[in-house]
Image (cartoon, rainbow, N blue to C red):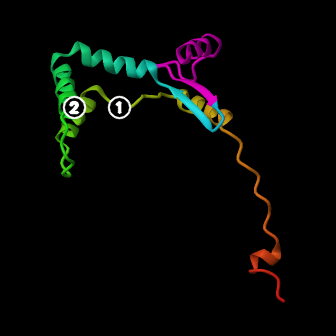
Amino acid sequence: MNRLRLTLHRLFRRPAVTGPKRIYLRRIPTGVMLDLEHTITDAITAIADDEELLALLLEYAAERAEPRPYDGHAPERLLLERIVETVGYEVPLYGDRVTELADRLRALAPERPAVAPVSASRREGGAAA
């Protein structure tokens, strides 16, 4: 169901950012969902196409699968850092795309609840008896 909703969303909405990596936005009751499928697909493809990265990912998975008590040392984190460093973890935005994304996010952001003004007596710590 979620995949169908995302497909329909993409058919009828233009991406918030069209390049170099497309980013779609979808409003939810508490904020906005960023659709980074193209970025994640590129990262997974880069891992699959590089034998060394794929070996690191498989080693990472094997390390995480081993049951062991937590001793404050997580050797698999070093493997993950090497993968992420190579594949990348940032989404580039150039030129006007920055302000376009900011404007779209601002437009989709949920409204802030109105705050009632504080009365003078409450500011002073309550009315004197």
Dot 1: element: loop
Q: Kindly report the distance in space between the C-alpha atoms of the residues bearing marks 1 and 2.
A: 24 Å
Which quarter of the picture shows residue 27?
top right
The range drawn in magenta is 1-27
Kindly tell me whether residue 117 is visible in this rendering: yes
- Could you tell me the amino acid type at mark 1? Tyr
For mark 2, what is the residue? Answer: 65
Cβ atoms at labels 1 and 2 below 8 Å apart: no
The residue shown at (31%, 15%) is 45
Which quarter of the picture shows residue 97?
top right
The residue shown at (39%, 22%) is 40
* Residue 12 painted magenta: yes
Label 1 vs label 2, nearer the camera:
2
Return the x and y of residue 68 as percentages of the image width and height.
18, 42
55 vs 25, nearest the viewer: 55
For mark 1, what is the residue? Answer: 89
